[in-house]
Amino acid sequence: MLRLNNLKTYFFTEEGVVRAVDGVSLSIGEGETLGLVGETGCGKTVTALSIMRLIQEPGRIIAGEVFYNREDLLRKSEEEMRRIRGREIAMIFQDPLTSLNPVYTIGDQLTEVLRLHQKLDKKEALRRAAEILKLVNLPSPEKILNQYPHELSGGMRQRAMIAIALSCAPRLLIADEPTTALDVTIQAQILELLKELMQKFQSSVLLITHNLGVVAELCDRVAIMYAGNIVESADVNAIFKHPKHPYTMALMNAIPKLHREVERLEVISGSVPDLTAPPAGCKFHPRCEHAMPVCSEKVPVEKEIEEHRVACHLYDAD
Protein backbone atom coordinates (compact mmCIF):
# COMPACT_ATOMS: atom_id res chain seq x y z
CA MET A 1 0.00 0.00 0.00
CA LEU A 2 2.78 2.45 0.94
CA ARG A 3 6.40 2.28 -0.17
CA LEU A 4 9.17 4.80 0.43
CA ASN A 5 12.28 4.61 -1.73
CA ASN A 6 15.40 6.52 -0.67
CA LEU A 7 13.38 9.44 0.73
CA LYS A 8 15.48 12.51 1.62
CA THR A 9 14.10 15.56 3.41
CA TYR A 10 16.57 18.29 4.35
CA PHE A 11 16.18 21.60 6.18
CA PHE A 12 18.26 24.45 4.80
CA THR A 13 19.04 26.60 7.86
CA GLU A 14 21.54 29.35 8.65
CA GLU A 15 23.51 26.83 10.75
CA GLY A 16 23.75 24.40 7.83
CA VAL A 17 21.80 21.67 6.05
CA VAL A 18 19.94 19.42 8.51
CA ARG A 19 19.67 15.94 6.96
CA ALA A 20 16.54 15.00 8.92
CA VAL A 21 15.54 12.12 6.62
CA ASP A 22 18.54 10.85 4.72
CA GLY A 23 17.61 7.97 2.44
CA VAL A 24 14.69 6.19 4.14
CA SER A 25 13.16 3.14 2.48
CA LEU A 26 10.26 1.23 4.04
CA SER A 27 6.93 -0.33 3.12
CA ILE A 28 3.53 -1.00 4.71
CA GLY A 29 1.21 -3.73 3.46
CA GLU A 30 -2.59 -3.79 3.30
CA GLY A 31 -4.02 -3.94 6.83
CA GLU A 32 -0.55 -3.96 8.40
CA THR A 33 0.70 -1.89 11.35
CA LEU A 34 4.32 -0.77 11.11
CA GLY A 35 6.03 0.74 14.13
CA LEU A 36 8.64 3.42 13.41
CA VAL A 37 10.88 3.58 16.48
CA GLY A 38 13.81 5.74 17.55
CA GLU A 39 15.00 8.44 19.92
CA THR A 40 13.69 11.99 19.78
CA GLY A 41 15.33 13.85 16.89
CA CYS A 42 16.00 10.84 14.67
CA GLY A 43 13.58 11.91 11.89
CA LYS A 44 10.39 9.93 12.59
CA THR A 45 7.95 12.86 12.49
CA VAL A 46 9.67 14.42 9.45
CA THR A 47 9.22 11.08 7.65
CA ALA A 48 5.47 11.19 8.40
CA LEU A 49 5.13 14.83 7.33
CA SER A 50 7.02 14.01 4.11
CA ILE A 51 4.50 11.27 3.31
CA MET A 52 1.68 13.78 3.83
CA ARG A 53 3.54 16.45 1.83
CA LEU A 54 3.33 18.84 4.80
CA ILE A 55 6.99 19.86 4.99
CA GLN A 56 7.32 23.63 5.36
CA GLU A 57 10.22 26.01 4.70
CA PRO A 58 13.11 25.82 5.29
CA GLY A 59 12.48 22.10 4.77
CA ARG A 60 12.34 20.44 1.37
CA ILE A 61 11.96 16.91 0.03
CA ILE A 62 14.99 16.72 -2.23
CA ALA A 63 14.94 13.11 -3.43
CA GLY A 64 13.15 9.79 -3.32
CA GLU A 65 9.72 8.34 -4.03
CA VAL A 66 6.59 7.92 -1.90
CA PHE A 67 4.36 5.37 -3.59
CA TYR A 68 0.76 5.07 -2.37
CA ASN A 69 -1.22 2.51 -4.37
CA ARG A 70 1.56 2.55 -6.99
CA GLU A 71 1.29 6.32 -7.50
CA ASP A 72 4.13 8.63 -6.45
CA LEU A 73 2.72 11.24 -4.04
CA LEU A 74 5.71 13.47 -4.66
CA ARG A 75 4.54 13.97 -8.24
CA LYS A 76 0.99 14.94 -7.25
CA SER A 77 -0.22 18.53 -7.43
CA GLU A 78 -1.22 20.30 -4.22
CA GLU A 79 -4.88 20.06 -5.25
CA GLU A 80 -4.56 16.28 -5.70
CA MET A 81 -2.86 15.98 -2.28
CA ARG A 82 -5.70 17.90 -0.61
CA ARG A 83 -8.12 15.29 -1.94
CA ILE A 84 -5.93 12.47 -0.60
CA ARG A 85 -5.26 13.94 2.86
CA GLY A 86 -8.05 13.05 5.26
CA ARG A 87 -9.87 10.78 2.85
CA GLU A 88 -7.16 8.29 1.80
CA ILE A 89 -4.36 9.08 4.27
CA ALA A 90 -5.01 10.63 7.68
CA MET A 91 -2.71 11.63 10.51
CA ILE A 92 -3.06 11.80 14.29
CA PHE A 93 -0.63 14.48 15.40
CA GLN A 94 1.54 14.39 18.49
CA ASP A 95 -0.06 17.27 20.42
CA PRO A 96 -3.81 17.69 19.87
CA LEU A 97 -3.91 21.06 21.67
CA THR A 98 -1.66 22.64 19.01
CA SER A 99 -3.07 20.56 16.13
CA LEU A 100 -6.74 21.39 16.72
CA ASN A 101 -7.79 24.91 15.72
CA PRO A 102 -8.50 26.81 18.98
CA VAL A 103 -11.08 29.20 17.44
CA TYR A 104 -13.35 26.50 15.98
CA THR A 105 -15.51 24.01 17.85
CA ILE A 106 -14.84 20.28 17.65
CA GLY A 107 -18.05 20.02 15.61
CA ASP A 108 -16.85 22.63 13.09
CA GLN A 109 -13.54 20.83 12.60
CA LEU A 110 -15.08 17.38 12.31
CA THR A 111 -17.91 18.37 9.98
CA GLU A 112 -15.50 20.29 7.74
CA VAL A 113 -13.70 17.03 6.95
CA LEU A 114 -16.96 15.18 6.34
CA ARG A 115 -18.42 17.90 4.09
CA LEU A 116 -15.21 18.26 2.11
CA HIS A 117 -14.50 14.59 1.45
CA GLN A 118 -17.92 12.93 1.71
CA LYS A 119 -20.01 15.81 0.29
CA LEU A 120 -22.53 15.68 3.16
CA ASP A 121 -24.86 18.56 3.92
CA LYS A 122 -24.56 20.32 7.28
CA LYS A 123 -27.32 18.35 9.04
CA GLU A 124 -26.06 14.97 7.87
CA ALA A 125 -22.45 15.91 8.68
CA LEU A 126 -23.43 16.82 12.27
CA ARG A 127 -25.29 13.53 12.68
CA ARG A 128 -22.32 11.58 11.36
CA ALA A 129 -19.91 13.62 13.54
CA ALA A 130 -21.89 12.70 16.68
CA GLU A 131 -21.72 9.01 15.66
CA ILE A 132 -17.95 9.20 15.24
CA LEU A 133 -17.43 10.89 18.63
CA LYS A 134 -19.50 8.12 20.20
CA LEU A 135 -17.34 5.57 18.39
CA VAL A 136 -14.20 6.91 20.11
CA ASN A 137 -15.97 6.64 23.49
CA LEU A 138 -16.49 10.35 24.11
CA PRO A 139 -19.40 11.01 26.51
CA SER A 140 -22.21 13.37 25.50
CA PRO A 141 -21.06 13.73 21.86
CA GLU A 142 -23.75 16.34 21.08
CA LYS A 143 -22.31 18.55 23.83
CA ILE A 144 -18.70 18.03 22.72
CA LEU A 145 -19.59 19.07 19.16
CA ASN A 146 -20.24 22.58 20.54
CA GLN A 147 -17.11 22.76 22.69
CA TYR A 148 -13.70 24.25 21.87
CA PRO A 149 -10.44 22.28 22.24
CA HIS A 150 -9.38 24.12 25.42
CA GLU A 151 -12.60 23.02 27.11
CA LEU A 152 -11.63 19.34 26.84
CA SER A 153 -9.14 17.31 28.87
CA GLY A 154 -5.99 15.96 27.21
CA GLY A 155 -7.48 12.49 26.75
CA MET A 156 -10.70 13.89 25.31
CA ARG A 157 -8.75 16.09 22.87
CA GLN A 158 -6.78 13.06 21.73
CA ARG A 159 -9.99 11.10 21.18
CA ALA A 160 -11.37 14.05 19.18
CA MET A 161 -8.20 14.02 17.04
CA ILE A 162 -8.63 10.29 16.44
CA ALA A 163 -12.27 10.89 15.49
CA ILE A 164 -11.28 13.53 12.93
CA ALA A 165 -8.55 11.28 11.50
CA LEU A 166 -10.91 8.29 11.16
CA SER A 167 -14.00 10.23 10.04
CA CYS A 168 -13.57 9.25 6.38
CA ALA A 169 -12.30 5.72 7.10
CA PRO A 170 -8.84 6.31 5.57
CA ARG A 171 -6.96 3.38 4.12
CA LEU A 172 -3.71 4.56 5.74
CA LEU A 173 -3.50 6.09 9.22
CA ILE A 174 -0.32 7.78 10.48
CA ALA A 175 -0.24 8.05 14.29
CA ASP A 176 2.60 10.26 15.54
CA GLU A 177 3.29 9.57 19.24
CA PRO A 178 -0.47 9.37 19.94
CA THR A 179 -0.05 8.97 23.73
CA THR A 180 2.99 11.15 24.53
CA ALA A 181 1.28 14.02 26.37
CA LEU A 182 -1.09 11.82 28.38
CA ASP A 183 -0.84 10.25 31.83
CA VAL A 184 -0.33 6.50 32.08
CA THR A 185 -3.98 5.60 32.74
CA ILE A 186 -5.23 7.63 29.77
CA GLN A 187 -2.40 6.26 27.60
CA ALA A 188 -3.68 2.72 28.22
CA GLN A 189 -7.24 3.76 27.30
CA ILE A 190 -6.11 5.46 24.07
CA LEU A 191 -4.00 2.45 23.07
CA GLU A 192 -6.92 0.09 23.69
CA LEU A 193 -9.14 2.40 21.63
CA LEU A 194 -6.63 2.50 18.78
CA LYS A 195 -6.39 -1.29 18.78
CA GLU A 196 -10.19 -1.62 18.56
CA LEU A 197 -10.49 0.97 15.79
CA MET A 198 -7.63 -0.52 13.76
CA GLN A 199 -9.46 -3.85 13.77
CA LYS A 200 -12.80 -2.21 12.95
CA PHE A 201 -11.59 -0.07 10.04
CA GLN A 202 -8.91 -2.50 8.76
CA SER A 203 -6.69 0.46 7.94
CA SER A 204 -2.96 0.18 7.42
CA VAL A 205 -1.12 2.08 10.17
CA LEU A 206 2.24 3.79 10.52
CA LEU A 207 2.72 4.13 14.28
CA ILE A 208 5.50 6.51 15.28
CA THR A 209 6.78 6.09 18.83
CA HIS A 210 9.79 5.71 21.09
CA ASN A 211 7.82 3.42 23.40
CA LEU A 212 8.71 -0.20 22.72
CA GLY A 213 5.86 -1.38 24.95
CA VAL A 214 3.39 0.29 22.58
CA VAL A 215 5.13 -1.40 19.64
CA ALA A 216 4.84 -4.83 21.25
CA GLU A 217 1.15 -4.22 21.88
CA LEU A 218 0.05 -2.88 18.48
CA CYS A 219 2.53 -3.56 15.67
CA ASP A 220 3.07 -6.34 13.14
CA ARG A 221 6.48 -5.12 11.99
CA VAL A 222 9.04 -2.63 13.27
CA ALA A 223 11.51 -0.26 11.59
CA ILE A 224 14.24 1.15 13.83
CA MET A 225 15.35 4.67 12.85
CA TYR A 226 18.55 6.45 13.83
CA ALA A 227 19.78 9.87 12.71
CA GLY A 228 17.69 9.95 9.54
CA ASN A 229 18.18 6.33 8.47
CA ILE A 230 16.45 2.97 8.96
CA VAL A 231 19.06 0.73 10.61
CA GLU A 232 16.94 -2.39 11.11
CA SER A 233 13.50 -3.73 10.25
CA ALA A 234 11.79 -7.04 10.98
CA ASP A 235 8.69 -8.76 12.31
CA VAL A 236 7.86 -7.47 15.80
CA ASN A 237 8.58 -10.82 17.47
CA ALA A 238 11.93 -11.14 15.71
CA ILE A 239 12.96 -7.64 16.80
CA PHE A 240 12.20 -8.33 20.45
CA LYS A 241 13.65 -11.85 20.55
CA HIS A 242 16.75 -11.41 18.39
CA PRO A 243 17.67 -7.75 17.70
CA LYS A 244 20.57 -7.54 15.23
CA HIS A 245 21.71 -3.91 15.05
CA PRO A 246 23.72 -2.61 18.04
CA TYR A 247 21.35 0.38 18.30
CA THR A 248 18.32 -1.93 18.51
CA MET A 249 20.13 -4.02 21.12
CA ALA A 250 20.87 -0.88 23.14
CA LEU A 251 17.22 0.22 22.98
CA MET A 252 16.13 -3.22 24.22
CA ASN A 253 18.67 -3.21 27.04
CA ALA A 254 17.42 0.20 28.19
CA ILE A 255 13.93 -1.21 28.89
CA PRO A 256 13.41 -1.84 32.64
CA LYS A 257 12.84 -5.56 33.35
CA LEU A 258 10.65 -6.53 36.28
CA HIS A 259 12.28 -9.96 36.71
CA ARG A 260 15.79 -8.54 37.08
CA GLU A 261 17.04 -6.37 39.93
CA VAL A 262 19.65 -3.80 38.94
CA GLU A 263 21.22 -0.88 40.79
CA ARG A 264 20.73 1.46 37.84
CA LEU A 265 19.06 1.30 34.44
CA GLU A 266 21.17 0.83 31.33
CA VAL A 267 21.50 3.85 29.06
CA ILE A 268 22.86 4.49 25.58
CA SER A 269 25.93 6.66 25.97
CA GLY A 270 26.10 9.96 24.10
CA SER A 271 23.23 11.48 22.12
CA VAL A 272 21.78 11.63 18.61
CA PRO A 273 24.37 13.43 16.44
CA ASP A 274 24.03 16.93 15.02
CA LEU A 275 22.39 16.25 11.67
CA THR A 276 24.07 19.27 10.07
CA ALA A 277 27.38 17.42 10.47
CA PRO A 278 26.68 13.72 11.10
CA PRO A 279 29.59 11.31 11.72
CA ALA A 280 31.21 9.72 8.67
CA GLY A 281 30.46 6.07 7.98
CA CYS A 282 27.85 4.56 10.28
CA LYS A 283 26.20 7.42 12.17
CA PHE A 284 25.86 5.27 15.29
CA HIS A 285 29.54 4.32 15.56
CA PRO A 286 30.55 7.00 18.15
CA ARG A 287 28.02 5.44 20.59
CA CYS A 288 28.43 1.80 19.59
CA GLU A 289 30.07 -0.84 21.81
CA HIS A 290 30.85 -2.95 18.73
CA ALA A 291 32.43 -0.22 16.58
CA MET A 292 35.28 -1.25 14.28
CA PRO A 293 37.63 0.92 12.17
CA VAL A 294 35.46 0.37 9.07
CA CYS A 295 32.43 1.84 10.90
CA SER A 296 33.91 5.35 10.82
CA GLU A 297 34.99 5.04 7.19
CA LYS A 298 32.18 3.40 5.25
CA VAL A 299 28.38 3.68 5.29
CA PRO A 300 26.96 0.16 5.93
CA VAL A 301 24.81 -1.36 3.21
CA GLU A 302 21.46 -2.85 4.22
CA LYS A 303 21.42 -6.64 4.00
CA GLU A 304 19.12 -9.53 4.88
CA ILE A 305 20.12 -11.45 8.01
CA GLU A 306 17.65 -14.26 8.77
CA GLU A 307 14.27 -12.44 8.78
CA HIS A 308 15.80 -9.02 9.47
CA ARG A 309 16.96 -6.25 7.18
CA VAL A 310 19.89 -4.57 8.90
CA ALA A 311 22.52 -1.95 7.99
CA CYS A 312 25.60 -2.84 10.06
CA HIS A 313 29.22 -3.79 9.34
CA LEU A 314 29.00 -6.60 11.92
CA TYR A 315 27.32 -8.66 9.21
CA ASP A 316 29.67 -7.87 6.32
CA ALA A 317 30.86 -10.97 4.49
CA ASP A 318 34.46 -11.88 5.27
Image: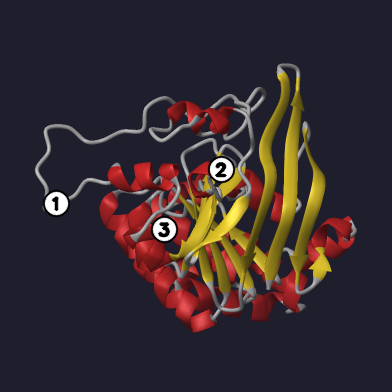
- The CA distance from mark 3 to mark 2 is 14 Å
Find the residue positioned furthest to the top: 15
Q: Earlier in the sequence, mark 1 or mark 2?
A: 2
Q: Which residue is mark 1?
A: 258
Q: CA distance from mark 1 to mark 2?
A: 36 Å
- Asked whether disc 3 touches disc 2, contact meaning CB atoms under 8 Å apart, the reply is no
Q: Are circles 3 and 1 on residues that touch, CB within 8 Å?
A: no
Whether residue 212 appears in this view of the structure is yes
Residue 81 pos. (x, y %): 81, 61
Reply above or below: 76 against 150: below
Residue 293, image x, y percentages: 53, 28
- Could you say where residue 229 lies in the image, as x and y percent from the top left? 61, 44
| Res. 52 in view | no
Q: Nearer the viewer, residue 310 or 240?
A: 310
Question: What kind of residue is marked 1?
Answer: Leu
- Tell me if 312 is positioned left or right of 22 in this view: left
Reading the image, the residue beneath label 2 is: 98
Say left or right for 250 vs 145.
Answer: left
Name the amino acid, label 2. Thr
User: Which SS class for mark 1?
Assistant: loop
Q: Label 3 belongs to which residue?
A: 156
Q: Residues within 10 Å of mark 3 (few under 14, many from 20)?
A: many
Question: Reading the chain from its start, which is encountered first: label 3 or label 2?
Answer: 2
Depth-wise, is mark 1 or mark 2 nearer the camera?
Answer: 1
Picture residue at 59% right of the left edge, 24% below the top: 274
Give 193 or 76, whichever is nearer the viewer. 76
Residue at 64% over, 65% down:
27
Q: Which mark is residue 180?
A: none
